[in-house]
Amino acid sequence: MNFINYTVSERVAYITLNRPDKRNALNFDVVSELKDAFLDAEQDPNVKVVVLRANGKVFCAGADLEYLQQLQKNSYADNLADSSHLKDLFHQIYTHKKVVIAQVHGHAIAGGCGLATVCDISFSAPEAQFGYTEVRIGFVPAIVTIFLLRKIGETRAKEMLLSGELISAKKAEEYGLINFIVPADEIEKRVFDYAQMVCKQNSMQSLQLTKKMIAEVQEKDLTEALTYAAQMNAHARETADCKRGIGAFVNKETLEW
């Protein structure tokens, strides 16, 4: 891979944006490598958690502006294909079978903020800023809107998407966009510790089913949602992990997954 570093250590896959000279900006090739890396992590039975991080001062500055200029020469069909390429990446991360943690040490802007938004858990350094600046260059934050509305609600989403302003990590935490603010020199260890907690204390089958429910249940009406939840409950009881976990609980055994 030219723009992404991929490593696995202690059941954690690290996907690292490695285009610091371009502020880790996204283009077709970067998105392609991200999709390949997330697929590798999903298919690796030795991986339980994925950490998305970046090299350089900026987490991700969004779309590569030179690339956007090139796209202006494309037909609608070509632009739709390119847009769908990014859409597929966001959907892939959001519905990933493994827990995905964003380690945001620097600014996450536009599509870069979108990457943090679709991750399950986000850690941020206090200096990082977040925002969707698309409206300031005559563009639209189209794809991420779907996920941002789910994550922080319409009021906050409108504020961010229509103003184009960057917000601090503190405000991003207050909005529910990120989970934890950690000093920059501690963020790597805190992310590692959190990832290891998930790996050791939680069932992989349970994590997968829970993530699946969160992604699917929100669009159902109350009756459908409850029926779906009951079905998932019944299905979970049949899994090997559930039988193992309940057995350990009943026998007062310490369980490490």
Image (tube, rainbow, N blue to C red):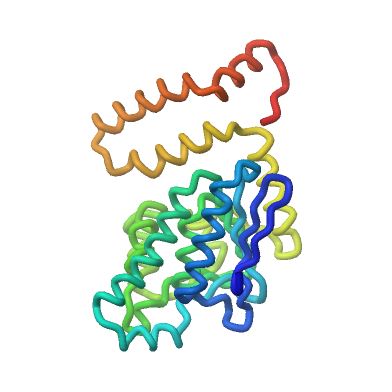
Q: Position of residue 121 (x, y in %)?
A: 55, 51
Can you say which quadrant of the picture contains the C terminus? top right
* Residue positioned 62% across, 83% down in the render: 21
Q: Is residue 6 left or right of residue 146?
A: right
Q: Position of residue 86 (x, y in %)?
A: 40, 66
Viewer-closest of 93 and 5: 5
**Quadrant housing residue 70:** bottom left
Q: Is residue 56 above or below residue 190?
A: below
Viewer-closest of 83 and 158: 83
Can you say which quadrant of the picture contains the N terminus? bottom right
* Residue positioned 46% across, 34% down in the render: 209
Viewer-closest of 245 and 186: 245
Q: Is residue 202 left or right of residue 35?
A: right
* Residue positioned 53% across, 32% down in the render: 205
* Residue positioned 57% across, 82% down in the render: 22
Res. 204 visible in picture? yes
Q: Position of residue 101 (x, y in %)?
A: 58, 53
Q: Is residue 198 above or below residue 233?
A: below
Res. 126 visible in picture? no
